[in-house]
Image (tube, coloured by chain):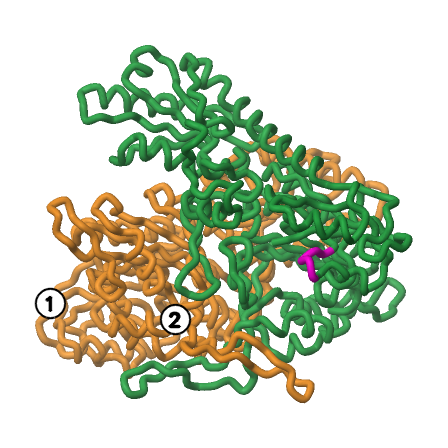
Chain colours: A orange, B green
Amino acid sequence: MSTTRTAISPRRAENFPSWYQEVVRAADLASMSHVRGCMVIKPWGWGVWELMQRELDRMIKERGHDNVYFPLFIPLSYIQKEAEHVEGFAKEMAVVTHHRLEKRDGKLVPAAPFEEPLVVRPTSETIIGETMAEWVQSYRDLPLKLNQWANVVRWEMRPRVLLRTTEFLWQEGHTAHADEAEAVAETLEMHRVYESFARDWLAMPVVAGEKSPTERFPGAEQTFTIEAMMQDGKAVQAGTSHYLGQNFARSAGIEFTDVDGARKHACTTSWGASTRLVGALVLTHGDDDGLCVPPAVAPHQVVIVPMLRGEDVDAEVLDYAREIATDLRRHATRFGPLRVHVDERATRPSDKKWQWIKRGAPLLVEVGARDAAASVVSYRNRFSPAEQLRKPFAEFVATAAAELESLQDKLLAQAQRRLDENIRRDITTRAEAEVFFKQDRAGFVLAGWCGSPDCETGLKALGVTIRCLPTRLGTDAPCLPCGQTSRHSAIWGLSY
Amino acid sequence: MSTTRTAISPRRAENFPSWYQEVVRAADLASMSHVRGCMVIKPWGWGVWELMQRELDRMIKERGHDNVYFPLFIPLSYIQKEAEHVEGFAKEMAVVTHHRLEKRDGKLVPAAPFEEPLVVRPTSETIIGETMAEWVQSYRDLPLKLNQWANVVRWEMRPRVLLRTTEFLWQEGHTAHADEAEAVAETLEMHRVYESFARDWLAMPVVAGEKSPTERFPGAEQTFTIEAMMQDGKAVQAGTSHYLGQNFARSAGIEFTDVDGARKHACTTSWGASTRLVGALVLTHGDDDGLCVPPAVAPHQVVIVPMLRGEDVDAEVLDYAREIATDLRRHATRFGPLRVHVDERATRPSDKKWQWIKRGAPLLVEVGARDAAASVVSYRNRFSPAEQLRKPFAEFVATAAAELESLQDKLLAQAQRRLDENIRRDITTRAEAEVFFKQDRAGFVLAGWCGSPDCETGLKALGVTIRCLPTRLGTDAPCLPCGQTSRHSAIWGLSY
């Protein structure tokens, strides 16, 4: 691959936002639909999401949560009950006002209006709370640990495919506990689950921490977040966990009789991660030739392209390609059995090759007649796709799993290095922050915050917010906006 | 279990509809929510649905379909394009008219109305068609075989939990083909998939056949259906497959350049199966003690209840229960590795026992101190829960998988016998049909249909419709409503 021509145009360095859109398109992940703000998730994108779901679902169930399903529609009155929650969500919801269409003058128009309109769930605390109130009567019914995989809708004024869409898919966990200590422990446990899922499966290192008050989930007492750094230095909030105190339990009436006979309100939590993780994957592991999917979540970890030329040797080439696939499928990485695909379509081999490079298949095998005759395997590793590699058949099959694991490790190391190098401790004043965040490629600033609400939002004009008060990073620097003594270490940054 | 007391009241023979509601409740499958017509799917019900999904998804993928995801919202204009489709669906849709809520006088009210309202998808032919039109340009892009798992909404005036709900979950397959023959073959292939899935996994034998014109999917050229017979003799339409001809391709503009250079419209299909299958499972395999879940889709195939009494021996009892579980998990049925659950909750053992009988766990082991001491296993098979069985530890572990498979086979045989016995060939006149369908427990009538539209709907006053024109059953009987010579054999019946 020449250094001047790349599969994606523009390149990252030229125009990062356009590069992102182009990779999402070229890698066949998703596209915006004609329905404003809503997206179509295409087969390759869905395959990645399905693998994310599978592992996250396993981690959630392993911790004793049960999957359930609650209604898409929420009566307006439920949302109205929790005052802070209303304030946070009321602005951007899809409202269902009619349940029939009628034809008038040949055109369909809404008919049969509701007395009380319904909203399409932007999140399900309120409706799940109403049911929890029925399910929870005694301390014996606690903890109640639920999760659902669902679509939610938040009307977006400035949608961006995968990262910020009006409809998106997610899991939302909702739990109720007898006391604060247990509920906070649950919140932190799921916070850690997101952190390790992002690191170990998405090869996406994050800064874990607590949100400052204005960035909390509406109605939460505490919100914990994992903040991943994209290649342009901006943050993606990649999974949040909320300790809701008794706020939602009070408004929904989740009460129980405790061991001592007293009636108490439960303490609840909620936590979610969404399809925006697929967008974050692109912004983390994309390059100027497209996406590189971490093997853990690659729908096909090895793609085999037989170089069919409409000649007699085609049958041998195809047989050899299938033989490689069959043998590979007997092996496994630490992420499970190998997922291998033989691309037998009638498309031109070089078009196929580029398609799989852009989609980011981790290993790409091109099988020609000479490979079949000599029992060798010619392949590329998506980490360095310009390099054509060659191994004897048996060696390739025996080492593919290790090569995939090594690719996963390299992606993590590369992202970790980028994160570490771009957490700046040397920017300690508002003036320095202004210069830094106007760069093309900024990063996170680890500095102080005095704790005042004014300073919390003091850099909003720059688009900069406190991404989190990090758990494992600290600084003695003064408050970034005001220069006074800090009460907290804070990660300041731009975000998606 | 005495013959006079049953876990479910009323019994099937007393009041079948109430019995159904009670089993859905007592088996912890689902409940109707406060949102009219919408349901909450509870952990045990979701577990069953998840296993149904897993196997059906596998069968769909195995046949070369890719999973995708399309928007929840459909612009009104899309639906308006296909005339027949509009007629069939326009009456019962949820309409989104606003995308904001505002507070006025302390109350939330809808704001920011759309120019063009959106409907919540009742099914996705129209919106997927619009995208297929973009994806399909040449014969090389065909066949295009897509599937999605999604929620859909059809406003129900008379909702019934799991069977007929305003919001339900399903998979909907959508495919496009170059010609009619291939599209019809696809339709029939998926029709057969539903038939074998129902039989082999749900132990639910069905009558497979084609729908008569008025019962077709709106806009389809042909609709194929599997009709399962419930214990009250009524039919549940359990999965439908539609050959859509070029109708949707024309309205959405799905055109391609064929091998010969000519521009042609694609031929499309769609097919779906939904959460109503969970309701059908209850109506097929429920008894007066609750549900009996076919082992293939039982979230726990073996439930082990340690009889803990707060005594010294509790630790041994618990150890022994866990040992049984560990050993069982090394075995597998033809449906995969055994799913075993040890119920360690602090609930009273007899309450747990009845809970699992009502939920329909296939094998229920009760572990007492004497079992642990003697290394025997005392258990019940949900097929005959009154019978307490006993086997030595090693024998139980070695034979559990076979016993589960045998239970699955028995459930199928029982349902098959009921179906066979209740397909009546001796009812050949309108007068006989009137008497038959007024019984408490009716069935299917295999009789004739002359082919006229009047006769097709001729028994609607009785609530009786043509369920299908069966593929593998035939009769020479005359037309059931009019007595004239038949053109088709037809299954006439009541339905859910």
Q: Nearer the viewer, residue B81 or A71?
A: A71
User: A336 left or right of A304?
Assistant: left
x and y percentages locating residue B251 in the rendered image: 74, 74
* Disc 2, SS: strand
Q: How many marks?
A: 2
Amino acid tagged 1:
Arg
Residue lying furthest left in this view? A485
Query: Is A320 in the magenta?
Result: no
Q: Which residue is mark 1?
A: A487
Q: Is residue B455 above or below residue B107?
A: above
Is disc 2 in the same subunit as disc 1?
yes
Residues drawn in magenta: B461-465
Q: Which residue is mark 2?
A: A75
Q: Secondary structure at mark 1?
A: loop
Seen at 70% across and 51% down, the residue is B493
**Residue A371, quarter of the rendered image:** top right
Q: In this view of the protein, which residue sits in the foreground, B481 or A224?
A: B481
Residue occupying the point 27% across, 60% down:
A242
The amino acid type found where label 2 is placed reads Pro
Q: Say if residue B336 shows up in the picture.
A: yes
The correct choice, above or below, for A492 with respect to B384 in the image is below
Question: For the residues marked 2 and 1, what is the alpha-carbon distance in whole angstroms?
Answer: 42 Å
